[in-house]
Amino acid sequence: MPLLRVLDLSHSFMFKELPAGIGNLAELRYLNLSHTDIVSLPEEMRNLVKLQHLNLQHSFLQELPAGIGSLVELRYLNPSATRIRSLPEEMRNLVKLQHLNLWHSFLQELPVGFGNLAELRYLNLSGTGITSLPEEMKNLVNMQHLEFQSSCLQELPAGIGDLAELQYLNLSNTWIRSLPEEIGNLVKLKHLDLRTVFLDRIPQGAISRLSELRVMKLYNSMWEEGSEGFNISELESLEHLIHLDLTTSTVHDLERLLGSSKLLKVTRFLQLEGCEGLTTSIRLSYLFTEIRRISIEKCNMLEEVTIGADGETYDDYPVSSLEYLHLRNNSGLKCILVGCGCFENLSSISIEHCYKLKKIDSLLQLESLEKIEISNCYELEEVISKIADDDDDDEEVGDKGLMQLSFISLKNVPKLTSIWSDALHFPSLEVMEVSACPKLKKLPLSLHSAHNSLREIRGGKECMMTSKGFDDIEACLMLSNYRAELHRIAAIRAGPNKKDLDLAYHIEHLHMAKQKIREEKLKLEDRCSATATYGRADTSDIHIHKGSKGKLRNSKHGLSSRPNLQMEEGS
């Protein structure tokens, strides 16, 4: 095969090394060894002098041979996600190399002579152990795309400003603490990612000089603003800016943002963290029409968050683009109010560690909600509350429901007694998760609440022990629409005296399930009453799963000490 030009061995696990004869393929241009068990390359690889494309990603390669320097026609080299710890100095000979991807390799430093790769346009060192860059990086004058995400990089050399063609620079989640003044020389830079970079200082005027900048990501990053440093007003001078992710920790910065119609139009992610001057309440209304994600964290003086507009005026408000709202570690937050309209795109709400939160009013007005997560809210008693002047009766609201909701998770909400006072319509609900909510005894479900959609119900040991709780489980079994055998319902472990009460029964088919469940429920309640003298029963974890075909699985010693309630469906 002396004329072979393309050899693709990707996803082949038949061999760990290439035969020496690979060097005889003198016309080979393309070699793909990705996703293989290759651990080394033969020295004969040096004979592939016409090779232009070499893909080694996700292999077990431990080093590149020195002979790789002979591949003088190589344009593309990808040893990403390999075990390579160093590069041979002979790589300086790859003067035509344009694309080098070392993503998540074990690389610790770049070799001497790396600056010789003057044609290099793409370099990815994300996830590597690189801590610094050589000064000769300034010689890579054709570089257009640089990535260092989640690497150990601690500083940028001043020579970074000589990369006049650079358009994309990703420094997110690195150890960099300051940016050099010369970064302002990157006049063709279009994308700058500084997410999760805790900068001590951004040079004043450097950002405003990036005249072509289109995307600026400062989300979850802290930077010092002052007379000698960067301030938000610099962003207003960027004529081509279309995407801004921003974290602010002062009310002063927030006011600057709100006072700039230009920045409000381009802001996509906004994080308010530790805004000590942010007191009493905040209304997420028409001011945030273009923002897709808002996170409010550690604003301990904040007591109230209002989502939406006043009921009488909301028709005048433009529709918001907000999709995700995250409230975390706001220790003073007591109330979340949901107003009318404008937040038609809000699909996910996450509330964590808001210890004083007592009320969430009119959540049902957020009709596009797909995901609700609430955890460690110690005072919350009801997830979906109604405002006092709500004229809708429960039946009408229940029919309306949350049409798009697919996932709801409630964890460690000890005072929670109700999700909603009656059954709700959940046509899209797939997973309901409840744990460490000891006072929650009833789910807002009926036989038709999540017809054809519910796949899993995950419950903790404190939940659903009353007769009403068993009604809920019965409803869940029916609405899950199982059409094959339901294999297992087992296990209620008794209380303080460790008297075991085990129940396991088999349901043949869905059309017979309802009557069988009712009969066994009555038996179970009788047996629970008979054991009342031994103390309050304690449930094990409950897990209802609609998935692949399965069988009743017990350990070889019988039921485990923490048995599960699990049902599986065959196709």
Image (tube, rainbow, N blue to C red):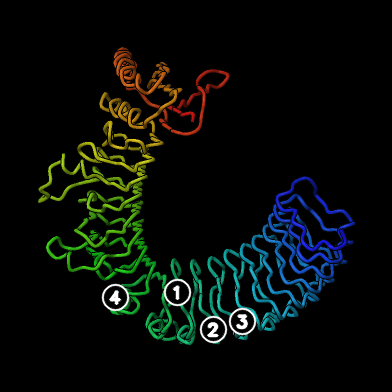
Q: Can you identify the residue that label 1 sits on?
A: 223
Along the polypeptide, which appears first: circle 4 or circle 2? 2
Q: Mark 2 = which residue?
A: 188
Are the residues at dot 3 and dot 1 in contact (C-beta closer than 8 Å)?
A: no
Q: Tell me which label, 1 or 2, sits earlier in the chain.
A: 2
Measure the alpha-carbon separation of dots 3 and 4: 33 Å
**Amino acid carrying mark 2 in the image:** Lys
Horizontal and vertical percent position of residue 70: 85, 71
Between the C-alphas of marks 2 and 3, the distance is 13 Å
Q: Amino acid at mark 1?
A: Trp
**Residue under numbered circle 3:** 160
* Disc 1 crowd, CA 10 A, few/some/many (<14, 14-19, 20+): many
Q: Residues within 10 Å of mark 2 (few under 14, many from 20)?
A: some
Which mark's residue is nearer the viewer, 2 or 3? 2
Instruction: Look at the picture and state if 164 lies above or below 417.
Output: below
Q: Nearer the viewer, residue 171 or 537?
A: 171
Residue nearest the viewer, comparing 431 with 515? 515
Q: Which mark is residue 258?
A: 4
Q: Which residue lies at the image location 37% right of the left edge and 67% below the top edge? A: 270
Marks 3 and 4: CB-CB under 8 Å?
no
